[in-house]
Image (spheres, rainbow, N blue to C red):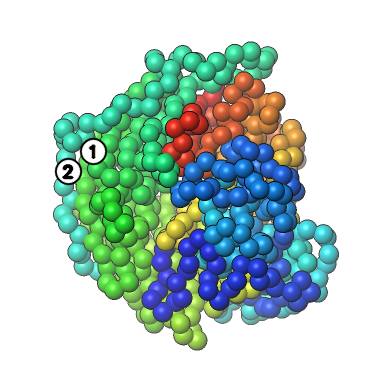
Amino acid sequence: MTQPPDQPPHGAFGPPQDQPPGDRPPQDQPPQAGGFGPAPQTPPAQGGFGPAPQTPPAQGGFGPAPQTPPAQGGFGAPQPPAGPPQQPPPGYGYPQQPPQPGPYGAAPGPYGYPQQPGPYGAPQPGYGHPQQPPYPGMPGAAPGGPLDGKRASRKKTALITGSAVAALLVIGGTVFAVTGDGDGGGTKKPVARQSDDPKDSATASPTTSAGGGADPENLNEGRRPGEAKVLWYKPAPDAPASGADAPGMWITGGTAVKAAYKQVFAFRAADGGTAWGPLTLPQKICAVTPQKSADDKIVVAYMNGGGDRAKCNQLQQLDLRTGAKGWSTEVADGGLFDSALSVELTVSGTTLMVGRSQSGTAYDIDSGKKLYDKKKYGAACFPAAFAGGTGRLIQVASCGAGTAKEHEEIQELDPATGKVRWTQALKKGWEVTRTYSVDPLVVYLTNRDKKAWNISTFTEDGKFRSEVKVNEKFAPRCGWAVLERELQGCQGVAVDAGMLYLPTDSTVSANEIVAISLSDGKAKWRVKSPVDRPMAPVKVEGGKLVAYVRPSYDAGGQVVSVPVTGSSHRATGLLRNPQGAADAEDTFYDGVVDWVDGRFFISSGRLSGDDDSKEKLMMAFGN
């Protein structure tokens, strides 16, 4: 979300004016004490699931990406690299040294690593796809780790206001632990429209297999013993040459639902046949609720026009089971510097929270009734971002911008009333960049001045619980945001009641998933990828961690499970995708993945708009 008015604005496609792209902190300079979490670090020069190739292949997907940004706006097709990069590219969102000057202010790298310069690093498209030039100040996805194994001296820091916690230092690229002491309206009334309204008629859905079972591209041809099959796949709909968003993916009640550009598509999960729709909205979709409600409702936001001044302020509720349109409304602007140019949507129970630049408005997701507003409070504190799920609603506020008391605060709200349950203040300079989980609460923080990161966990009543103390480079993958902070949407990370599961950093070879205790932040066990390809957590279900192993040029991807209790944590195969579909599986742009009812689903998070690429919107694998 945008910064409060007294805060310096973040630039786009380049570094802030006071930080040239080539500037780097001295390598031998000791870090300074940090806020809620680690002390600053010298960001690693390289990341992303291990060493990245010097000359990346031309094709993206869940694999290495070209180093030069697309020639046109959006997520266009990658251009061939002009030569090897100046330094090994990073990946998956690690803080790092600023790259050599390049197009748009920085040279991008694969696997979604932030491409500093910039307070946080660059946005991160997914699993190794070509990516946009960085937006300085936008969040990265994962912390950095060791490069050369050098050790550094320990230094005490005060991290949380009024609390004694531990910090992580990085010097010479090495991470290690350091202990420290230390409401009223303004929106239009929701209007329900019938799902058979003539305005709802849409263009034909993406076609594939005419009845959902054919395989016109012969992706299942030559399947080897033990390989699963492609159940169905759908080509991407037409999109502008500059590309288009394809946010969200919801699997429920035997239906797989996907948003793309101006439409919402629904397919039968078993065979890919049309379940309902597609539904076409008047303008492009600009935000969705990452979660669905308990009764399978979602809300999508779309633009109020097609021009440069259009706002992302039109809301439409949808029933995932039937495709019926429910209520709709327009999000009003807040006060000065608090527009609905971009919004953030989150669901907690039956409450929909719509976040603007400096405020939020809550609605009942079933009826569209406005519940309350969250606005400025206390000493110039403005709501800056929200995250929800499983009945919890988290608010991050920016306080005292531009003053000596500038800091951020984390609050838990009662989703139904907006009442504050608890507040936790952070030390100046530390910002909540992502939530890896809201129940239990696990947050990823960054400090732009110190180029430092921290992962911290909290008790149910908001007390600091622990922070990650593992000397490792980790590589979860998170989406990227333009104006909003977008706390939600990280993939490649899983959390249960007692553990945080993070993948170690590798670009092409086998990596590990590390189970980290939420009680003390220490690693309890780790499991290596069963093949020479990286894997990342998907979810925890039935007492087992489900993980996805990326495809290679000669093998499809895999879905594996790992017991989370007991003494043995060996990966067991659940699904082995066919080799004949490996190329297609590896080309999903900013891929969204899920494992539901014994089927593996993958869909694009962004459409390139390249009519010649035979781009796919979604694929499903199963036995």
In the image, residue 122 above or below residue 536: below
Q: Where does residue 503 sit, x and y in percent of width and height? A: 67, 47
Residue under label 1, please give it. 325
Q: SS for tag 1?
A: strand
For residue 237, side relative to residue 327 (left or right): right
Q: Where does residue 565 sit, x and y in percent of width and height? A: 67, 41
For residue 532, side relative to residue 100 (left or right): right
Residue under label 2, please give it. 192
In the image, residue 316 above or below residue 100: above
Does any portion of residue 169 appear in the rendered image?
yes
- Which quadrant holds the N terminus? bottom left
| Amino acid at the residue labelled 2 | Ala
What residue do we see at 18% from left, 51% from top?
190
Q: Are circles 2 and 1 on residues that touch, CB within 8 Å?
A: yes
Q: Nearer the viewer, residue 1 or 36?
A: 1
Labels 2 and 1: the sequence-earlier one: 2
Q: SS for tag 2?
A: strand
| Amino acid at the residue labelled 1 | Lys
Residue placed furthest toward the bottom: 404
Give the number of the disc on residue 206: none
Instruction: Using a 10 Å C-alpha cutoff, classify the residue at mark 1 as few (fewer than 14 neighbours), some (14 to 19) or many (20 or more).
Output: many
Q: Nearer the viewer, residue 471 or 518?
A: 471
- Which quadrant holds the C terminus? top right
Instruction: Using a 10 Å C-alpha cutoff, classify the residue at mark 2 as few (fewer than 14 neighbours), some (14 to 19) or many (20 or more).
Output: some
What residue do we see at 28% from left, 34% from top?
279
Q: Where does residue 262 sit, x and y in percent of width and height? A: 32, 40
To which quarter of the image does residue 267 belong? top left
How far separated are the C-alphas under marks 2 and 1?
A: 7 Å
Q: Where does residue 476 sit, x and y in percent of width and height? A: 61, 50
What residue do we see at 28% from left, 53% from top?
307
Q: Nearer the viewer, residue 41 or 123?
A: 123
